Image (cartoon, rainbow, N blue to C red):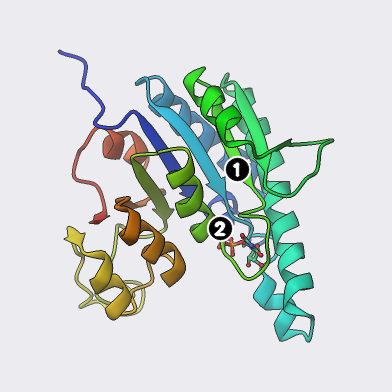
């Protein structure tokens, strides 16, 4: 059988902090991290350059701090640190399955992650290293979705692959509404106008203005990342 050819050469995968929860309700399930790493390896083996933006919601979100009366900027800094913890775990898992990986933090934490230097990151990718981005864009009031969109532009990724718990973008929450309809593809503007929960509106606007497509797919179905990069119909295409 002829080897399938990927449709992308460089992708940015957005993994939420929740994707690392696995069997736990808080923190990191290292087996889950290893399983994700294994799937990333399969994508790498197709010759695709991979960067990952990791979230922090499994540990801390700024909103939790503000609800408890914290200053938003301070609470978001805690959220940013949560993403760095996840970045360390993900790098560890990727290395365990044999991937050469660089962890790049947008906040300077020299002892454990590289600073973000755009050309250096591109060089890592060209040398087939997987790059894990943490600390979002390094500033409060943003999300790792927006950071994913920004970094995708900076490193010239052809697509953002947004990993979720559901099969794509639906007209309503499929966990709550059994009549929710899944879109095969949808326009950026519709996502914003309908208020669909794909990524936050800053992230969608950035993708829209700069024509970066987003594939929203279910990470809990094994092989989905590989199928998506091979151009198979997986999830929903936002374009
Ligand atoms: N955060 C931030 N600036 C950024 C990215 C993230 O302040 O550029 C903070 C924010 O408090 C957020 C937390 O980090 O709640 C974790 O990120 P996010 O909620 O995007 O993680 P995910 O939902 O993907 O797990």
Is residue 206 shown above or below 62?
A: above
Residue at horizontal 44%, vertical 45%?
152
Is residue 12 shown above or below 73?
A: above
Q: Residues within 10 Å of mark 2 (few under 14, many from 20)?
A: many
| Image location of residue 151, percent across then percent down | 50, 46
Q: Quadrant of the C terminus?
A: bottom left
Is residue 81 shown above or below 98?
A: below
Find out if the beta carbon at label 2 lies less than 8 Å from the nearest ligand 1 atom: yes
Residue at horizontal 79%, vertical 71%?
74
| Image location of residue 149, percent across then percent down | 45, 53
To which quarter of the image does residue 191 belong? bottom left
Decide if residue 206 is on the left or right side of residue 99: left
Residue picked out by circle 2: 144
Give the structural element (helix, strand or loop) at label 1: strand
| Image location of residue 80, percent across then percent down | 70, 58
Instruction: Report the label total.
Output: 2
Residue at horizontal 63%, vertical 38%?
90
Residue picked out by circle 1: 133
Q: Determine the residue located farthest toward the top in the rendered image.
A: 1
Residue in front for this viewpoint, 153 or 37: 153
Given contact means CB atoms under 8 Å apart, are the residues at marks 2 and 1 in contact? no
Give the structural element (helix, strand or loop) at label 2: helix
Q: Quadrant of ligand 1?
A: bottom right
- Let me know if residue 205 appears in the view: yes
| Image location of residue 141, percent across then percent down | 63, 71
Q: Earlier in the sequence, mark 2 or mark 1?
A: 1
Q: Residues within 10 Å of mark 1 (few under 14, many from 20)?
A: many
Q: Quadrant of the N terminus?
A: top left
Decide if residue 105 is on the left or right side of residue 9: right
Residue in front for this viewpoint, 81 or 224: 81
Residue at horizontal 38%, vertical 47%?
161
């Amino acid at each position: 059988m002829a080897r399938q050819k990927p449709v992308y050469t460089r992708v940015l995968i957005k993994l939420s902090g929740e994707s690392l929860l696995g069997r736990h309700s808080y923190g990191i399930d290292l087996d889950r991290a290893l399983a994700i790493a294994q799937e990333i390896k399969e994508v790498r083996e197709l010759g695709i350059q991979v960067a990952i933006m990791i979230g922090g919601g499994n540990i801390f979100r700024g909103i939790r701090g503000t609800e408890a009366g914290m200053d938003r900027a301070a609470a978001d800094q805690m959220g940013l640190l949560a993403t760095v913890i996840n970045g360390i775990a993900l790098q560890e898992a990727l290395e365990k399955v044999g991937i050469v990986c660089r962890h790049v933090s947008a906040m300077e934490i020299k002892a454990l992650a590289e600073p973000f230097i755009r050309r250096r990151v591109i060089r890592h990718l060209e040398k087939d290293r997987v790059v894990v981005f943490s600390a979002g864009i390094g500033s409060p009031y943003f999300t790792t979705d927006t950071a994913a969109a920004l970094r995708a532009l900076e490193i010239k990724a052809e697509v953002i692959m947004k990993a979720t718990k559901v099969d794509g973008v639906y007209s309503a929450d499929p966990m709550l509404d059994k009549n929710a309809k899944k879109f095969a593809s949808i326009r950026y503007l519709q996502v914003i106008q309908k208020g669909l929960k794909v990524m936050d509106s800053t992230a969608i606007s950035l993708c829209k203005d700069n024509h970066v497509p987003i594939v929203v797919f279910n990470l809990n179905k094994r092989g989905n990342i590989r199928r998506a990069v091979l151009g198979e119909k997986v999830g929903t295409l936002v374009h």
